[in-house]
Amino acid sequence: MNISRRTFIVASSTPVALAALRADAQGVVRPGVPIALPRDFGAHPGFRIEWWYATGSLAVPGVDDPFGFQITFFRARTDVPAANPSAFAARQLLFAHAALTDPLARRLRHGQRIAREGFGIAQASTSDTDLKLRNWTLRREATPDGHAYLAHIDASAQGFALDLRLAATQPVLLQGDAGYSRKGPEPSQASFYLSEPQLAVSGNLTLDGRERAVSGRAWLDHEWSEALLHPDAVGWDWIGMNLDDGGALTAFRLRRKDGSALWAGGSLRSADGDTRNFGPDEVVFTPGRLWTSPASQVRYPVEWTIAAPTGRYTVRARLDAQELDSRASTGAIYWEGLSDLFDAGGRRIGRGYLELTGYAAPLRLG
């Protein structure tokens, strides 16, 4: 089934889209709610937690190894009553993370920010992707043949800045059941989940004051939810891989404290657009080599074997030291970084990002 060809993406002026907006106001994730674009590219303040997550690899002329980048904007609804009349009431919080996997220095550079929404400092548009946190921005623009994301990140205090254009080359991928993605045994443990694999990247990377032209491939996820995690879940393991043949592989599992899988899922979209969704019993993550962070002393599996209905894969981090300490914003320490994907015969077939959360401490969202 190719979900990109189904009729669940609707123009935002239709009655069905208005129903989606009403569901948004109630903060309920349920199957059968159509995805309304471009409105659903924007923020959903009626839901407790939301993020826009862009990752990718960058080729730099004269450098053999690729750089990796991650740009994430989070929005969180607080418990401040909507009726509170104060302009200073923190009804919505915005966070942002940016990271650069630097193969020259063999380390991860990263920055983070947090602010309450408003006052021209932090904003998340509800009509389309238009995010701002001080001078960090992520904005979607329509183009004659589709759309692109414009990202600006000035993390000069950490030695890097990014000005990137991420242009869509494929239709939006609706994860799960037409965008309704289960994350646990209860139907409410779910998110609305859109992916955009195989984004064509161009722009500039400034590294230690030197600007360099870059090109590459990226992946963007957009999720929003009210109650994403089961009480027994401490974190997740996730991959989003752009395949060399033009396909896209997603796989994830929610993990208990003892390391066992609470829930799992994912999908494979082939280069011709056909999509195979994975059920919770069809994905198995098996950890391989471990790396211990010298900063946090947390141990992370930086190599994995992943079995899915479409094959058996190996995921291998390109650099071990890709731990991100976000305790100054979202409060978590986690690992995410540029990784390669191999088939059962050991042939490299793709590249993307591996994310590992809940290894330092149980993850708490919202």
Image: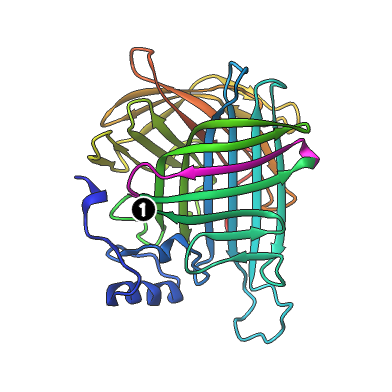
| Depth check, front residue: 364 or 55 | 55
Number of marks present in the image shown: 1
| Depth check, front residue: 282 or 48 | 48
Query: Compared with residue 130, is residue 60 higher up or lower down, i.e. above or below?
Result: above
- Percent across and percent down for residue 95 are 65, 56
Q: Give the side of residue 181 with respect to residue 148, left or right.
A: left
| Depth check, front residue: 327 or 38 | 38
Colour treatment of the image: rainbow
The residue at the point 47 percent across, 68 percent down is: 127
Residue closest to the far left: 1
Q: Is residue 344 visible?
A: yes
Q: Quadrant of residue 156?
A: top right
Q: Amino acid at mark 1?
A: Ser
Q: Give the side of residue 120 with respect to residue 336, left or right.
A: right
Residue closest to the far front: 144
The residue at the point 72 percent across, 30 percent down is: 297
The residue at the point 69 percent across, 51 percent down is: 331
- Percent across and percent down for residue 355 are 53, 37
- Percent across and percent down for residue 205 are 65, 35
- Magenta region: 157-174
Instruction: Say whether residue 163 is magenta.
Output: yes
User: Residue beneath label 1, please?
Assistant: 181
Q: Give the side of residue 231 with respect to residue 196, left or right.
A: right
Position of the C terminus by quadrant: bottom right
Query: Compared with residue 352, is residue 173 higher up or lower down, i.e. above or below?
Result: below
Q: Is residue 230 visible?
A: no
Q: Quadrant of residue 289?
A: top right
Query: Compared with residue 214, is residue 74 higher up or lower down, i.e. above or below?
Result: below
Callout 1 secondary element: strand
Position of the N terminus by quadrant: top left
| Depth check, front residue: 30 or 218 | 218
